[in-house]
Amino acid sequence: MTYPFTPARILICLLFYAGLFLIISLHGLKMTPAERKTLILLWPCGFVVAFVANYLLYRAGVMSFLPWINNFLHTFVWIGIGFPYLWLGIRGRRSIVVQYLLFVVFSAIIKYIEQVLFGTWEHPNFFGIQGNFWYILGWSTVDGTYPLLIPAGVRLAGKFVPGIITG
């Protein structure tokens, strides 16, 4: 059951995103022009792919429906900006295991925040593993693969877009 998307609930969600961005920024990265250009490239790509994928996964029956406002906030702000910014700050500075775990934990936090505020992420199972806890944890573990997917994407994009980082 979804809750009303009131301006107050949306603002609280954005404040949680901002708080997590503040935590992520503790990596101390001073972005180079190439990293900024990469972030600007990853933002719309991540947003569009995740926005469409969330809907298609819902239609396939493996995800709960994310109302358009929630899907937009989640994919535009978190997937589009948060994940690339996190990756830029930790790539090459942390092992792939640590990167994976950071993405899983941040993803689970976001999903629970959105569930509390909007009543979303309520699916009863993750590919047959029963329970909403496993659903949220399951999709968070899938999000943990972003540190593997982003480098592959930027290497491919680097063939067509000069001036971005490719590793």
Image: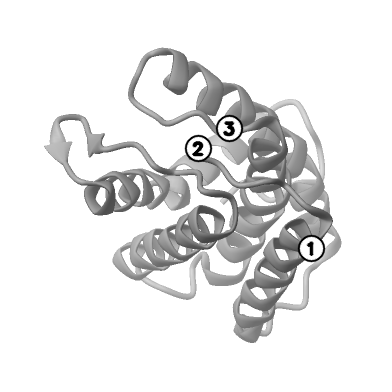
17 lies left or right of 131: right
Q: Which label sits in the foreground, 1 or 2?
A: 1
Amino acid tagged 2: Ala
Q: Is residue 29 above or below residue 35?
A: below
Residue 122, image x, y percentages: 39, 42
Q: Answer whether labels 1 and 2 touch (C-beta < 8 Å).
A: no
Question: Could you tell me if residue 158 is visible in this image?
Answer: no
Mark drawn on residue 152: 2
Give how far across and how far down residue 9 sits, in percent: 72, 60
Residue 8 numbered mark, or none: 1
Quadrant of the rendered structure where residue 156 is? top right
N-term-proximal mark, 1 vs 2: 1
Indicate which label's residue lies in the foreground, 1 or 3. Answer: 1
Q: Which mark is residue 50?
A: 3
Few, some or many C-alpha atoms within 10 Å of disc 3 (few <14, some 14-19, many ≥20)? Answer: some
Spot occupied by residue 100 in the image (x, y as percentages of width and height)? 36, 60
- How far apart marks 1 and 3 lie (CA) works out to 25 Å
| Residue 72 % position (x, y) | 71, 38
What secondary structure is marked by label 3? helix
Q: Amino acid at mark 1?
A: Ala
Residue found 75% across the figure and 26% down from its top: 160
Seen in the picture, residue 141 relative to 11 is either above or below; the reply is above
Cα distance in 3D space between marks 1 and 2: 38 Å
- Give the spatial CA distance, label 3 vs label 2: 16 Å
The local crowd at label 1, few if under 14, some if 14 to 19, many if 20 or more residues have their Cα within 10 Å, is few
Q: Residue at x 48, y 39 (%)?
A: 1
For residue 94, side relative to residue 131 (left or right): right
N-terminal label among 1 and 3: 1
At 67% from the left edge and 85% from the top edge, which residue is drawn? 28
Question: Which sits in the foreground, 98 or 54?
Answer: 54
Nearer-the-camera pick, 32 or 108? 108
